[in-house]
Amino acid sequence: MMAKHTALVAALCASTACALLAPPQRVRFMRPLKAAGLDPSSPQMQAEFEKLKDASRGFVEKELELMGIPHSADMDDMTIKLRLMEARIVMAAPAAAGPAANASPYEKLVFEKPAIKAYVDRLYNKGDINGANIFMEYINDPQQAQNRYGKEADYQAVFAKADELMAAPAFTSAKLAYSGFPMMGEDGLRGQMESIGAVKAFSVTEEDPVTGMTGTVEFEAEADAKTAVEKWDGADMGNDVMLSLKYQ
């Protein structure tokens, strides 16, 4: 067991070094990959290893490509699997206040409709890595996915499920994660939120002179949260800063 753990640690370190040296590639998912902070003996890493231990290199490379994670042909099979293990864990962690403005259609949609991520997770859990990859590709580019896989009956079922989930009502709640608001102090920003409706809970987690204030707010009424999103989400504050309010 110790030898296996040591090998896993060594491979993880090697994969992290490769990530720093890899040449830049076209990136769809813009959230950073911080592999150095992951413990190879953690339950999350062990669980991902069990899912991927029998996966082919082609499947692993395809998923990394869809996620926009750089990899190279000279990486050995263990290293490239570790890269994907790291990526899955980091990408599964929710952003503080929704996806980046230039995120892929899939990444944006999973914040609005959590049922989509739950479906992809179920595909992974039953070992259908190819189905999960094609599902994500269809959401990102339906025409390309149809051209590539449209003749396969099994994948037509995947496309139909994607259409069903995309057409479902978006998730809403009374609780929002926010970011980008000007530096007006906790009381001042809470007052802005209360101009929409009664606030049940409010917190500020970060105050930055450039990117503004970040935190969470929970309204008494879900309708007030929806009003706040409609009023402020996506508003341009200048200097490449935009207001963001995302349902939690």
Image (cartoon, grey):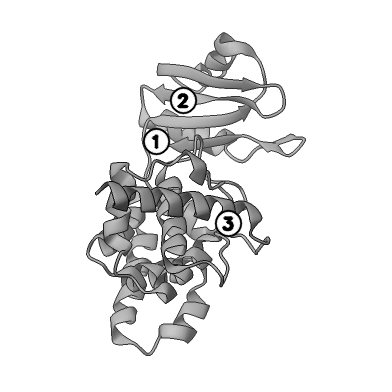
Q: Quadrant of residue 174?
A: top left
Number of the label disc, if any, that sits on residue 18: 3
Q: Earlier in the sequence, mark 2 or mark 3?
A: 3
Q: Which structural element holds mark 3?
A: helix
Residues at marks 2 and 3 touching, judged by CB atoms closer than 8 Å? no
Q: At 45% across and 36% down in the image, what residue appears?
A: 226
Observer-side mark, 2 or 3, equals: 3
Q: Would you place residue 95 above or below residue 21 in this image?
A: above
Number of the label disc, if any, that sits on residue 216: 2
Asked if one can make out residue 209 in the rendered structure from this viewpoint, the answer is yes
59 or 11, which is in the foreground?
Answer: 11
Q: Earlier in the sequence, mark 2 or mark 1?
A: 2
| Quadrant showing the C terminus | top left
Q: Would you place residue 146 above or below residue 129 in this image?
A: below
Relative placement, left or right, of 139 versus 124 is right
Residues at marks 2 and 1 touching, judged by CB atoms closer than 8 Å? yes
Asked if one can make out residue 103 in the rendered structure from this viewpoint, the answer is no
Image label count: 3
Marks 1/3: CA distance? 35 Å
Direction top: furthest residue: 187
Observer-side mark, 1 or 3, equals: 3
* Mark 1 surroundings within 10 Å by alpha-carbon count, few (fewer than 14), some (14 through 19), many (20 or more): some
Query: Percent from the top left, x then y, of residue 150?
Result: 40, 85
Marks 2/1: CA distance? 9 Å
Relative placement, left or right, of 180 versus 239 is left
Residue of label 1 = 248
Direction right: furthest residue: 239
Relative placement, left or right, of 225 versus 28 is left
12 or 165, which is in the foreground?
Answer: 12
What's the residue type where badge 1 is placed? Gln
